[in-house]
Amino acid sequence: MRDASRTHITHHASLVDMNKDSILYGIIGLLIGIMIGFFATNSINRSALVNAPTTVSGGAGAGGTGAALPPGHPPLDSAGSGSAEATAAATAASEKARKEPSNFDAQMQAASLNYQSRSYQQALEFYNRAYQLKPNDFEALTGLGNANYDLDRYAEAEGWYQQALQLKPDAVDVRSDLGSTYLLREPRDLDKAIAAYRGALSYNPRHEKTLQNLTVALLEKGDKTAAREMLKRLEEINPSNQALPELRSKAATP
């Protein structure tokens, strides 16, 4: 989930197997343009450098997007995040959660609805409440990662994603979003980003969001040979991927 969209980066973390997303042209442009393009179609996702975490709650294909969302990714609001309906639903859920502080499901519902309406700070509050009730809940941990990711708190997001991965090491979207926390932070850590993306691919070699973001990271590192290899795999999986023209151009330059 919010898929690096976030990938969250295709991030917003696991929010399903198949938590965010923009980078300018050039070094930042390649990251934002490439990442956002993929996540806009993916989810919150997060979720080009697919910069939006893949979020949690709802099931694969939540929201009717083309890319698969991580298990538990909140379904996208058909009326549009930030709409009056979404805001009203989030407000009602928040009131219920505050009245029932011991109700884990109420905290998660409030967190999810606030996240969908892009009230990330509010979402963070309720994911924290849920975490206090169930410290080992995968969706609560992933939600904390996604909310921090969307607030550009990449180091904090990394910590929550790491905890989630201890529970589900094969959560490809979360592992991919973890890679994007290294790629988007300042200063960037390209080696850790590349390692995390390769780790995600070890569980799913055809994970489009990860292949896309790994290509970006390799190009940023200057390893065009490896980048072209990933680009070829990405082209085979989805010849219509919107990031391909920009990636081809970057990979072709001396």
Image: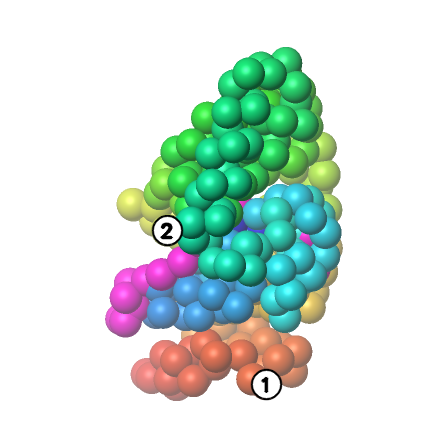
Name the image quarter holding residue 252: bottom left
Can the viewer see residue 24 in this picture? yes
Amino acid type, mark 1? Pro
Which of the colour schemes (rainbow, by chain, secondary structure, one colour) is used?
A: rainbow
Q: Which mark is residue 239?
A: 1
Amino acid type, mark 2? Leu
Nearer-the-camera pick, 148 or 83: 83
What residue is drawn where x is 52% and y is 19%?
98
Q: Quadrant of the C terminus?
A: bottom left
Give the magenta range. 16-29
Residue 154 position, x and y percent, is 40, 40
Q: Mark 1 packing: few (<14 Cα in 10 Å), some, or many (20+)?
A: few
Is residue 26 a member of the stretch shown in magenta? yes
- In the drawing, does residue 135 fall left or right of residue 226? right
Gap between marks 2 and 1, in whole Å? 26 Å
- In the drawing, does residue 35 fall left or right of residue 92? left
